[in-house]
Image (spheres, rainbow, N blue to C red):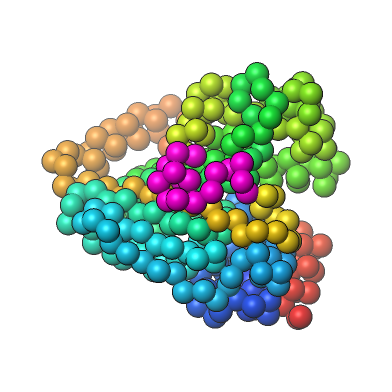
Amino acid sequence: MQVSLAEIEERTKAALIAHGAGAWQATEVARAVTRAEETGNVICGLYYLESYCLQLASGRVDGSVEPVVATPRPGAVTVDARFGFAQPAFTRALSPAVVAARENGIAALSVAHSHTCTSLGFFTEQIAAHGLIGIGFTNASAIVAGPGGKQPVLGTNPMAITIPGQDSPAMHADFSTSAVALGRITMAKAAGEDIPLGWAVDARGDPTTDPEAALEGALQPAAGHKGWALGLMVEALAAGLTGSVNSLDVKGLKLPNGSPHDLGQFYILIEPGAHGGALADRFARVSEAIAADAGARVPGVPRRHLDPVEVPDLLWSQVVALTSL
């Protein structure tokens, strides 16, 4: 069925509040869910709402906690999410981080002890809206094995980058360092579909096209050793620099019960004008060359803007049920 963005945001906020979230915290999470649906990122949209609500009810995430922001050094901003949602924590820390980037030319923003942030691009595009380059990293529950291995060690460990443009981002990329996002596997299983070879291995370490066997085994890194190295770098930044947990120590992100996720996100904010370059001109030169090559495009350009959004009937019925509790 077709559902407007306004109704998606309203229903999402109502569902979160009904399960124990505070009003302003629910507003921030609902914005992220709605943005994901608007851009066609269904894995990070309403698909996650039920787990948010179940984890609010069980106490796995604290939906009413107030994040604590600190500036230990001029170019560093930290925020302790206190086992709450990542979106409210980021909102509280964004303004001081932007100020720090403009004053220093570059700044780092670390979010510690948070629930999963789902789409990293939701955050880096907010950084770019201030005219800054935004780069983000986060880890997740262990589901990725190294090339040739079978033991999950890393999460899908995504990274995102948004480069500001004149009226809209000049580039926007948001991707996991695994061959595919975990949600693609679970959606294939639910639909009774096979997955392509190269996405995952089974529990014996053999390549598989069976999504159920993949979920019992491990995902593969993107581009072999290259994606594996990037995933390890993300792990070092997201867990190591924020003091949050390793992917190895996070149980399934959508499990209704258990310990808080306790994940970290790490962002770099760069003020282009502080470095004496010519970002707009140089990137325009590359963009023009890409545009002249039929079939090629700059990642994230143009951004998708869906309104209304096509939502599966069963999923929307679930959303409505969550708001009526």
Left or right of 166 on screen, residue 137: right
Going 51% across and 74% down the picture, which residue do you hit? 65
Q: Is residue 282 above or below residue 164?
A: above
Residue 292: image quadrant is top left
Task: Provide residue 261's location: percent of width, then percent of height.
Answer: 60, 56
Could you say where residue 273 lies in the image, as x and y percent from the top left? Answer: 17, 48
Q: Is residue 248 magenta?
A: yes
Residue at figure coordinates x 59%, y 29% from the top left: 221
- Residue 276 at what x, y percent from top left? 13, 41
The percent coordinates of residue 204 (x first, y second) are 79, 23
Location of the C terminus by quadrant is bottom right
Task: Farthest residue to the left: give it.
Answer: 276
Up/down of 128 relative to 33, above or below: above
Q: Is residue 108 magenta?
A: no
**Horizontal side, residue 219 vs residue 9: left or right:** right
Q: Which residues are magenta?
A: 235-250
**Residue for point 17% across, 56% down:** 103
Q: Is residue 98 left or right of residue 325?
A: left
**Residue nearest the observer in this picture, 174 or 21:** 21
